[in-house]
Amino acid sequence: MPSPPSPPRAASHAGATRPLFVRITHWVNAVAMSCMILSGWRIYDASPLFAFRFPPGITLGGWLGGAIAWHFAAMWLLVVNGLAYAAYGLFFGYFRRTLLPLAPRQVLRDFTAALAFRLQHQAGGGYNAVQKLLYIAVLLLGVAAVLSGLAIWKPVQFSPLTALLGGYGGARVVHFLAMAGIVGFIAVHLALVVLVPKTLISMITGTVPREAPRTEART
């Protein structure tokens, strides 16, 4: 006589998928980057590079001096937090575990799957190849934003860096493009959080809910 199937188990939790240090630096970075972007838009409005301005309602600082004060305060927080995150990622192998290996073939495969809405999220909160590439890109954009920001802040003291970026005007363009790339990454990141809310849970609690495998009926 066939035995009745076992009832489905309740959702269990994977082990820690996001170390506490990574979660803390992530949220500090989110606050610092938000302040820098919004105050940076107000600074940009004082001397636009292109034929548009950002609406005052979405900028931070109220006026040029206030925006500069916010920008520099957030800059130091971002740099200190970023250096701590980079040190942790390099010395404790977090970057190696989460962002590698990465090959063009893997990126092409996952990008094609994403276009067909068949991209699978990795078990345990890991990253697929497209996500790995985006995270590496935003880290590089962050470096470009910091270096170009230094060239704008102290063009004489950092004259070799300023010259490498094409002068003061060139550094402003690099800084703006780096900021635009970071904003684009944030937009995609938030969209994915809306589509897959458990990624937000993992960045708060360190674990991600997953369904335990069901027991098949036996005959």
Image (spheres, rainbow, N blue to C red):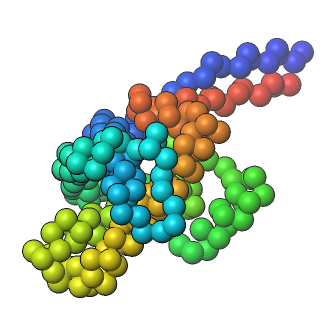
* Residue 62 location (% of width, % of height): 33, 41
* Residue 178 location (% of width, % of height): 41, 65
181 is higher (above) or lower (below) than 1 = below
* Residue 196 location (% of width, % of height): 61, 38
Whether residue 173 is visible to the viewer of this picture, yes or no, is: yes
State which quarter of the image contains the N terminus: top right
State which quarter of the image contains the C terminus: top right
89 is higher (above) or lower (below) than 145 = above
Q: Quadrant of residue 3?
A: top right
8 with respect to 173 (left or right): right
215 is higher (above) or lower (below) than 82 = above
Residue at the (26%, 56%) spot, across then down: 86
Residue at the (61%, 37%) spot, across then down: 194
- In this rendered view, identify the residue nearer to me: 91 or 137: 137
Residue at the (65%, 70%) spot, across then down: 108
Q: Residue furthest right?
A: 1
25 is higher (above) or lower (below) than 14 = below
